[in-house]
């Protein structure tokens, strides 16, 4: 199950320690690619399946998921239109959460880490980011949103596949994985949080045909629809969907699975690269986080306040990211540790 | 079940050797009246190794070659073998145009170049050692003291500093040209941070991928070893007593136009590519910031100019440098490659003295000729220059990039008169050289295969000994008649083949 494995190249003392900047770049490379894939899926699903009560596509829920309401209002007039939302999320370079802006960040991080990543990874990212940065509004119309989103998703998935198949398994790989799993954890909690409350403002409309379609769309937004269907005879109730996305052990985007992956990635860094000192406070936080998830059922989480719990998880993930930064790439200069060897 | 069809880069029709149909096919219209041709030579005295390449090339179809060229250029772009040009808000990635017709050197020619480059690098290092210590060469009056000590690239911080193995120029690029008789001549030495070696290796890879039918069976000297040799060179010159030295490549970063080459070399050596912010100096020792804390660094292949290395020692505005690096270096705690202050050795005026320096330090005649250079600081040089202004190129010694020079044959009488005044006013600021008819190489052009001028930059590595990468960067002036091979002015490159026999 774990991708972190147990076979690591033997490390020579003091040699081949990963540059902090490389660790940071690898982590953000994975996070941005994951974000782009999620956003493309969300745009596609919203166009096809997500409806407001009046039957119109629920574009503004995307703004809520990404906490982008203010940034959007600063650039475009309200209320949001489909055309403007798509421009904001696809081609708007002044919006840091647009696909174009994120592709730029992917490119900068990939260039920075280029000495480490495989030629095949670089070549695919080079072509992908160039094409994303050249996207224009007519491209969206010409290919159709669904065609464009599918292409973007496939490019992201190609990236993940090429990386899995070609990236050398050392610390750079582990920081890459850490970024990927943290991003997936964050994305799934945002999705659940916003969609749950838009769908069930008072908790009374469940069971209608409209509602089932909408819960289906939540699952599709996380690429979870068919996986969920395999859990026959589970019915599509809010608690079942929330339970699946949060707690399922086999679904690659569930919170449970990704927190476990974060934990095992930190363990690998700690034991194989002698980074116990840096990793142990991070592991402690993630163990506590996992415990809160394991100790509650979906029904309990909902009844105690889903929004509050999702906010708590997001805050913990943000704190973890901050701790990773402080531990591995501090802004303030390092001072030489007592055990750091002098010139050999 | 469908089996995938194996992909092949081979063309559907593989050209077969054309035997003795020497000037047939692709070369039917090829003509090189006034210049030395790298491939055809004079047809009656063509070495066998070149004949085999020419015959195989002759049978290629022009359209096929064009198709492969566009494939190659698309690959270079996808692979990111590019240099970046920045405009207002955009970064544009450009490739160096690649010509599919290789430039070929015989085993005998290479032997000559190899020995000549080694000799020159030895003298550059002896000269630098001397001028930063005993200064015998100045006291013996071999070269004017002013020219050396007053040179903008003379580095005061290096006076009296011993460097490991007395090696200053670890990586050197020697620009060579050939005149109309085919004689090799050194045009200039590049002893600071010479670039272009990544293209030598990437061009070979491209050639083997896209022209397997041309290269197959040819006895080519390999260029694969460069990264290993470079790493070994840097280990050779690490501070004394260090076992397993940590080598790094120090780059200005992703916005530098040569960043691809920095990535390439770091990867080939298997060492970290660092930027200034990745390094820190404490107690006059250099460390890099890693996820596990600070780790010592022993040898730095730096691709920044002297001025940007250390804001404490040189340009205080440098954001790229590492405070304290130069003092750590002076104390011998870290090695820089190349050393500081090597720019004085590849200076245009010092170049004019190289034949004399070779005789002075080695007691040998130069193996590679220099372009005949008249030193206007000397009475006979000045007199000759004044008498032949209309036939010479006159260059100010302190300028680079072709600024302030006069090409006599292209100047008006007024320009000649004005230049004469400047020359007489400050003769020691000038040298003069004859115009050289650069050799040509068959090159794929819009109207077919035509002759274009080329030069050659072999790369030499010096640690415990000197090693010259077989081949070098062949740059080609793609514009008809142009002698300028620089990439910024319509230059491209070719794969350089050194035949093993």
Image: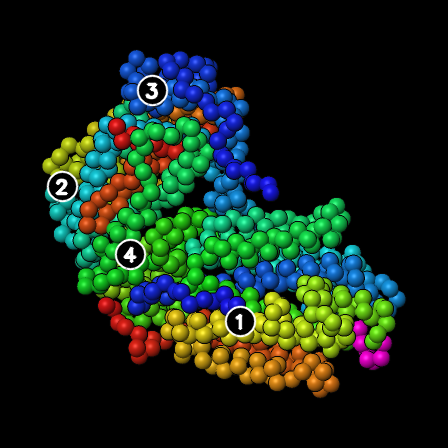
The alpha-carbon separation of the residues under discs 3 and 1 comes to 62 Å
- The answer to whether residue A328 shows anywhere in this view is yes
Q: Nearer the viewer, mark 2 or mark 1?
A: 1
Q: Which residue is mark 1?
A: A261
Check whether the beta carbons of the residues at disc 4 and disc 1 lie within 8 A of each other.
no
* The residue stretch that appears in magenta: A198-205
Sequence order check, earlier mark of 2 and 3:
3
Q: From the image, which quarter does the N terminus of chain B lie in? A: top right
**Which corner quadrant of the image does residue A215 belong to?**
bottom right
Q: Chain of mark 3?
A: B
Q: Nearer the viewer, mark 2 or mark 4?
A: 4
Sequence order check, earlier mark of 2 and 4:
4
Residue B216: image location, x then y, percent: 38, 30
The alpha-carbon separation of the residues under discs 4 and 3 comes to 45 Å
The alpha-carbon separation of the residues under discs 2 and 1 comes to 65 Å
Residue occupying image coordinates x 46% and y 33%: B210
Q: Secondary structure at mark 2?
A: helix
């Amino acid at each position: 199950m774990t991708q972190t494995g147990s076979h690591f190249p033997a490390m020579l003392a003091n040699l081949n320690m990963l540059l902090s900047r490389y660790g940071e770049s690898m982590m953000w490379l994975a996070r941005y690619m994951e974000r782009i894939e999620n956003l493309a899926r969300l745009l596609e699903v919203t166009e096809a399946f997500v409806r407001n009560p009046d039957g119109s596509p629920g574009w503004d829920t995307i703004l809520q998921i990404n906490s982008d309401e203010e940034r959007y209002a600063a650039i475009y007039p309200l209320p949001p239109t489909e055309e403007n939302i798509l421009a904001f999320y696809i081609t708007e370079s002044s919006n840091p959460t647009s696909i174009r802006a994120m592709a730029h960040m992917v490119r900068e991080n990939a260039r920075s880490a280029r000495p480490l990543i495989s030629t095949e990874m670089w070549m695919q990212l080079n072509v992908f980011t160039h094409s994303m940065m050249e996207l224009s509004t007519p491209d969206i119309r010409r290919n159709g949103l669904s065609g464009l989103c599918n292409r973007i998703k496939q490019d992201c998935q190609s990236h993940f596949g090429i990386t899995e198949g070609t990236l050398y398994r050392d610390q750079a790989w582990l920081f890459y994985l850490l970024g990927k799993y943290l991003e997936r954890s964050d994305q799934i909690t945002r999705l659940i949080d916003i969609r749950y409350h838009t769908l069930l403002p008072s908790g009374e409309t469940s069971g209608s045909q409209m509602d089932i379609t909408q819960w289906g769309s939540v699952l599709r937004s996380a690429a979870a629809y068919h996986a969920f269907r395999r859990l026959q005879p589970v019915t599509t109730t809010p608690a079942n969907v929330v339970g699946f996305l949060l707690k399922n052990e086999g679904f690659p985007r569930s919170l449970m699975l990704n927190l476990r992956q974060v934990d095992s990635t930190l363990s690998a860094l700690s034991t194989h690269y002698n980074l116990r000192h840096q990793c142990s406070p991070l592991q402690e936080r993630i163990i506590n986080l996992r415990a809160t998830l394991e100790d509650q059922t979906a029904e309990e989480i909902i009844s105690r306040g889903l929004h509050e719990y999702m906010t708590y998880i997001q805050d913990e993930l943000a704190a973890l990211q901050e701790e990773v930064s402080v531990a591995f790439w501090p802004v303030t200069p390092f001072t030489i540790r007592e055990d750091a060897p002098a010139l050999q | 079940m469908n089996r995938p069809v194996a992909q092949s880069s081979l063309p559907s029709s593989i050209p077969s050797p054309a035997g003795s149909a020497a000037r047939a096919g692709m070369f039917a219209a090829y003509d090189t009246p006034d210049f030395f041709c790298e491939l055809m030579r004079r047809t009656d005295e063509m070495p066998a190794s070149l004949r085999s390449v020419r015959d195989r090339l002759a049978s290629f179809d022009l359209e096929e070659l064009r198709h492969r060229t566009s494939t190659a250029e698309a690959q270079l772009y996808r692979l990111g073998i590019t240099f970046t040009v920045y405009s207002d808000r955009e970064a544009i990635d450009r490739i160096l145009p690649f010509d599919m017709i290789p430039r070929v050197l015989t085993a005998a020619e290479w032997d000559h170049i190899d020995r000549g480059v080694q000799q020159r690098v030895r003298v550059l290092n002896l000269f630098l050692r001397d001028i930063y210590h005993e200064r015998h060469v100045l006291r013996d009056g071999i070269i004017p003291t002013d020219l050396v000590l007053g040179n903008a690239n003379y580095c005061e911080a290096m006076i009296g500093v011993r460097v490991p193995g007395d090696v200053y120029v670890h990586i050197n690029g020697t620009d060579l040209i050939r005149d109309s008789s085919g004689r090799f001549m050194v045009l200039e030495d590049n002893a600071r941070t010479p670039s272009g070696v990544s293209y030598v290796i990437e061009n070979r890879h491209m050639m083997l991928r896209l022209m397997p039918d041309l290269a197959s069976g040819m006895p080519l000297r390999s260029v694969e070893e460069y990264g290993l040799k470079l790493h070994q060179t840097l280990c050779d010159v690490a501070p004394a007593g260090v076992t397993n030295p940590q080598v790094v490549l120090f780059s200005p970063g992703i916005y530098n136009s040569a960043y691809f080459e920095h990535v390439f070399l770091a990867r080939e050596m298997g060492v970290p590519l660092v930027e200034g912010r990745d390094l820190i100096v404490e107690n006059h020792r250099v460390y890099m910031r890693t996820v596990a804390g600070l780790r010592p660094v022993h040898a730095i292949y730096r691709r920044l100019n002297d001025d940007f290395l250390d804001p404490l020692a040189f340009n205080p505005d440098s954001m790229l440098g590492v405070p304290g690096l130069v003092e750590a270096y002076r104390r011998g705690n870290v090695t820089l490659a190349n050393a500081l202050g090597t720019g004085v050795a590849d200076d245009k005026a010092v170049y004019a003295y190289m034949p004399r320096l070779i005789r002075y330090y080695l007691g040998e005649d130069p193996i590679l000729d220099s372009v005949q250079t008249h030193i206007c600081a000397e009475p006979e040089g000045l007199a000759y220059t004044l008498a032949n202004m209309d036939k010479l190129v006159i260059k100010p010694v302190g300028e680079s990039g072709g600024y302030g020079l006069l090409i006599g044959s292209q100047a008006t009488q007024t320009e000649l008169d004005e230049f004469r005044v400047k020359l007489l006013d400050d003769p020691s600021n000038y040298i003069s050289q004859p115009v050289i008819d650069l050799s040509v190489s068959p090159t794929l052009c819009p109207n077919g295969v035509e002759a274009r001028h080329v030069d050659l930059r072999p790369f030499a590595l010096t640690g415990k000994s000197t090693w010259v990468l077989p081949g070098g960067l062949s740059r080609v002036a793609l514009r008809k008649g142009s002698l300028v091979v620089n990439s910024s002015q319509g230059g491209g490159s070719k794969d350089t083949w050194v035949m093993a026999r």
